Image (cartoon, rainbow, N blue to C red):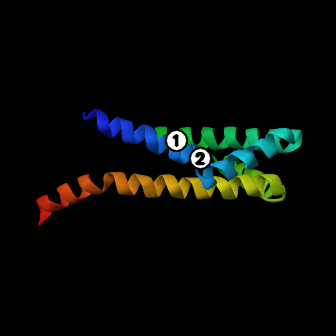
Amino acid sequence: MSHSVYAIAQQLEQAIRTSDEFQQLKQAYEAVRRDEAAYRMFAHFRDLQMQLHEKQMTGAAILPEEVEQAQKMMTLAQQNEKLVALMTFEQRMSTVIADINQIAMKPLEELYRSFTE
């Protein structure tokens, strides 16, 4: 693969690191880290999400109790302003990454679309 593609990818990494979206996410995360109760809740919620995601990816059944526990954790998280801010900035960063992925995949999409035309 062309060295320039990797060089551009590294530039993109730096652009992401210095973007407003990432800086806001980083600040929100640091605010949660400084708040022991918020961080504990965040870590527990993240672990639960990972467990459920792993089950989903392996085709294992997700029990109704697990869904209920996740919903309760989300309700609690939405009552903590630091966690709400963190989730908001995570969503914004996720949108940026999705947009970048869409742009990067455009040449392949156009190539494969040409086979069906």
Residue at point 70%, 50% (across, down): 70
Three-letter amino acid code of the residue under disc 1? Gln
Q: Position of residue 15 (x, y in %)?
A: 51, 47
Three-letter amino acid code of the residue under disc 2? Thr
* Location of residue 87 by image quarter: bottom right
* Residue contact between numbered discs 1 and 2, judged by CB atoms under 8 Å: yes
Instruction: Indicate the secondary structure of the residue bearing disc 2.
Output: helix
Pointer 2 residue: 18
Q: Tell me: 10 left or right of 35.
A: left
Residue 42, labelled with which disc?
A: none
Q: Tell me: 67 left or right of 104.
A: right
Which residue reaches farthest bottom? Answer: 117
- Residue 88 visible, this orientation: yes
Q: Tell me: 42 left or right of 56.
A: right
Pointer 1 residue: 14
Q: Position of residue 80 (x, y in %)?
A: 84, 55
Badge 1 density bin: few <14, some 14–19, many ≥20, Cα 10 Å: few
- Nearer the observer, 62 or 117: 117
Question: Quadrant of the image for the C terminus?
Answer: bottom left
Residue at point 74%, 47% (across, down): 27
Q: CA distance from mark 1 to mark 2?
A: 6 Å
Q: Position of residue 25 (x, y in %)?
A: 67, 50
